[in-house]
Amino acid sequence: MLDLNAKRVVGPAVRLHPNDNVVVARMPIEAGTALPSEGVTALRRVPAGHKLATRAIPAGHPVRKYDVVIGFAGEDIPAGGYVHTHNCVMGELQRDYAFGADYRAVEMVPEAERASFQGIVRPDGRVGTRNYLVVAATVNCSASVVRAVADWFTPERLADYPNVDGVVALSHALGCGMEMSGEPMALLRRTLVGTMQNPNVAGTALIGLGCERNQVSTLMEAHGLVNGPMLHPMVMQDVGGTRKSIEAGIAAIQAMLPEANRVRRSTVSAAHLTVGLQCGGSDGFSSITANPALGAAMDLLVRHGGTAILSETPEINGVEHTLTRRAVSEEVARKLLERLRWWKEEYAVGRDTQINGQVSPGNQAGGLANIIEKSLGSSMKGGTGPLMEVYRYAEPVTQKGFVFMDTPGYDPVSATGQVAGGANLIAFTTGRGSMYGCRPVPSVKLATNTPMFRRLEEDMDVNCGLVLDGEATIAEMGEIVFRHLLQVASGARSKSEVLGIGSNEFVPWQIGIVG
């Protein structure tokens, strides 16, 4: 297996485990290229990030990567053959969930020796990495108003409030034409309220239309919210319409600015850092560089008392047994399996979604044959430590350590749930290049390969392609990522923040019917 502590990548192809029958092309391998370390010659061109068979794989036999079965040969594959979607097919696998068999308690860093960052300590003790004011819509019918209010607060108008990072609109497509009770409405409300109460948010103007199903009054009552200096609810039909609601919203935020600006950063333990883990535009290098490097960083964060939230439920499909084996209890392991069961047997049954096998065109172009291969890399973001808890979408994350939140694989929806759960930082790995921002939470992009990093350097924060270039081990890269996350948490701007993006990525999960 790729040695996380010492081994540097060399040669044209990467072997990830002694038992594998494929290697991954580190660079394009032309037909006729000999791989002396594997004793084979490439029979045809293999693109960078794609797989080459190191021995003959008869039809129906497993294809192994990281000593995990990622599929079965759909035809006889000769040694030196190119392995991808044309000849690697999905099949049924028996998995040993072995609840807690590999559980090992984390060896914590003593409190006095833990890493720190410059955080914003809220009155209730929660710690933010940014300081935003929010204008939230209860329903799509007030979306234009909340955007108009937020857009009014230009950098010039906020110049007198240097400790306020901005005003962000939480607009969305839901709030009416949906069930008034049950999980769809509960999910929307906890997503809205969770984001409003994220430690990166100092105050909120909550704006509804007046006749929607998701009423301002019932939302506030359901979550115990109370009108106050830093929470101002209003209803457009009561205020007097669009123009007057925009004016009232602007006035409400203006009234909050002096208090929000009083915050100061102070030195706090890394235990106050909660990182939402995302991957998008994945490629064949994701499981070799950025994802395990982020996992190594999260192992460090957990040892320092912090929290790492792995999500994207479809993208653990096929490797969920690697998580149940590390679960702190059978109860936690069964929670994870129940979320997968719901996806497969209720939510996505018969649908052409990635949990049922096929990954996106970009993933395929990057070298990933199916969802199991993608899941193999995706799950690495969480590191190697014990799974301490499993949460439903947008539930408040209170357990320290490595946890899981049930979300779709679609990045904006997934990250929205994590932010609502309390993530004050997002770490986002990408191989093809994802341009993602996430106000009110900074998003740090980790590139899997150097060519993409250089091409998209304005959007990428960290080049984990150094692993592929033989310039860093996974452990060394993990340390680099960990230190970079602490810097961003302390106020250093991520690339997406420098570009000013992240205002359109609040996307609550719509799971119910529209009627």
Image: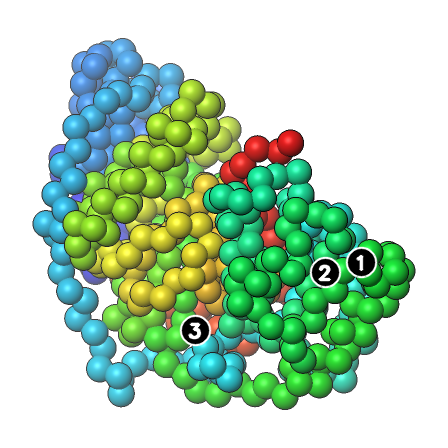
Q: Which residue is found at the position 35% from the left and 61% from the top?
A: 308
Q: Are marks 3 and 1 in contact (CB under 8 Å)?
A: no
Quarter holding residue 402: bottom left
- Labelled disc at residue 22: none
Q: Which mark is residue 236?
A: 1
Local secondary structure at mark 2: strand
Residue at figure coordinates x 32%, y 37% from the top left:
340
Whether residue 15 is situated above or below residue 46 in the rendered picture: below
Residue at x 65% of width, y 73% of height? 227
Would residue 134 appear left or right of 28 to someone viewing this image? right
- For the residues marked 3 and 1, what is the alpha-carbon distance in whole angstroms? 41 Å
- The disc, 3 or 1, on the residue closer to the chain's N-terminal end is 1
Foreground mark, 3 or 2, reads 2
Spatial separation of the CA atoms under disc 1 and disc 2: 7 Å
Q: Quadrant of residue 442?
A: bottom right
Q: Position of residue 213 (x, y in %)?
A: 66, 46
* Residue denoted by label 2: 207
Residue type at mark 1?
Answer: Met
Q: How is the image coloured?
A: rainbow
**x, y percentage for residue 433?**
53, 46
Which residue is label 3 attached to?
Answer: 486
